[in-house]
Image (spheres, helix red, strand yellow):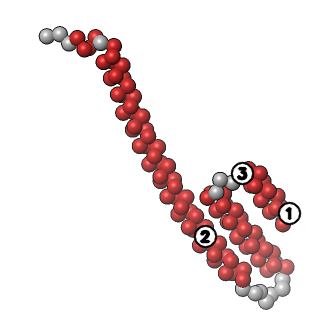
Amino acid sequence: MTFSFLTNPWFWSTFILLILLIMSLFYLYKFTTIILNLEVGIEKCLDILDERYQTMTKILEIPIFFDSIEVRQVIDNIRKSRDAILVIANILTDNISLEEIKEADENAKEID
């Protein structure tokens, strides 16, 4: 009994391609799960940022009755932090260009 298909080059090329297909499917599955886990993590982070943004907005709407420079600086820093949270959320959710990021950084520096 001879196995003539073992000497056939088509058999070996098909066998090698099958092994490569199985390896590529394994890595495809692996990278897909990594990307999906990353997406879930980003969604959770965006939810947290949204909650903090809403909390900061409510705090900033409250009028202050103490006219100290330190208090004004703290409120200004809270306002800047709120704006930074909004910029971070926009960067994570939109396909924002580098020029827009640079403009946002320049605007933040001008405010300082």
- Seen at 52% across and 58% down, the residue is 41
Give how far across and how far down residue 88 sits, in percent: 67, 61
Side of 22 where 5 appears, left or right? left
CB atoms of marks 2 and 3 within 8 Å: no
- The image shows residue 76, relative to residue 3, as above or below, that is below
In three-dimensional space, the C-alpha distance between marks 1 and 3, rounded to whole angstroms, equals 20 Å
Question: Circle 3 sits on which residue?
Answer: 97
Q: Earlier in the sequence, mark 2 or mark 3?
A: 2
Q: Earlier in the sequence, mark 2 or mark 1?
A: 2
Q: Amino acid at mark 2?
A: Asp
Q: Amino acid at mark 3?
A: Ser
Secondary structure of residue under mark 1: helix
CB atoms of marks 2 and 1 within 8 Å: no
Camera-side mark, 2 or 3: 3
Q: Amino acid at mark 1?
A: Glu
The disc placed on residue 40 is: none
Residue 5 lies in quadrant: top left
- Seen at 80% across and 63% down, the residue is 108
Q: Residue furthest left?
A: 1
- Seen at 44% across and 48% down, the residue is 33
Q: Nearer the viewer, residue 12 or 86?
A: 12
- The image shows residue 27, relative to residue 107, as above or below, that is above
Question: Circle 1 sits on which residue?
Answer: 110
In three-dimensional space, the C-alpha distance between marks 2 and 3, rounded to whole angstroms, equals 22 Å
Secondary structure of residue under mark 2: helix
Which quarter of the figure is the N terminus placed in? Answer: top left
Question: Circle 2 sits on which residue?
Answer: 50
- The image shows residue 31, relative to residue 13, as above or below, that is below
